[in-house]
Amino acid sequence: MTQIDGGRCRGEMQSIVRVSDGVFRIEGWAVDTRSGKPPRDLIFVDRSETIIGIARSGLRRPDLKSKVDAVPLDTVGWQGYVRHARTPAEQTLSPAYSTA
């Protein structure tokens, strides 16, 4: 899956499920490595910088605390939706923006 490591944000997109034509539910985890907290929202854009999806974090992921050094909390999981003609796995899809 897609690894996210932009220096300050670390995470991974772990699940992509088609829910209807051109709409995909995506799930993963993310953490701000400076604050040790997850971003509140993740905003996904395509190559032309058009917003194609959003995810909300705060889902419990206790499995990550023992596996990933950067994860001090167990509420770093996120789930969201993107709309695109191709599956997110067939394109470069990473959160471009996040909100604190």
Image: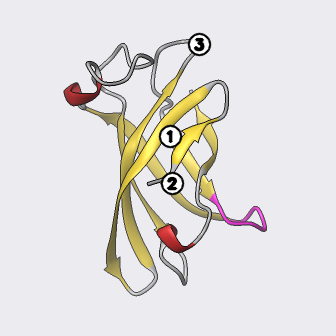
Residue type indicated by callout 1: Asp
Q: Are marks 3 and 2 in contact (CB under 8 Å)?
A: no
Residue positioned 78% across, 68% down in the render: 48
Q: Position of residue 57 (x, y in %)?
A: 39, 37
Specify start and end residues of the magenta stretch as a single range: 45-50
Foreground mark, 3 or 2, reads 3
Viewer-nearest residue: 53 or 3 = 3
Q: How far apart are labels 2 and 1 at the CA level?
A: 7 Å
Q: Are marks 2 and 1 in contact (CB under 8 Å)?
A: yes
Q: Which residue is mark 3?
A: 34
Residue 41's label in the rendered image is: 1
Q: Quadrant of residue 69?
A: top left
Residue type indicated by callout 2: Ile
In the displayed structure, 59 sits above or below 35; it is below
Q: Position of residue 81 (x, y in %)?
A: 42, 62
In the displayed structure, 96 sits above or below 40; it is below
Residue type indicated by callout 3: Arg
Q: Earlier in the sequence, mark 1 or mark 3?
A: 3
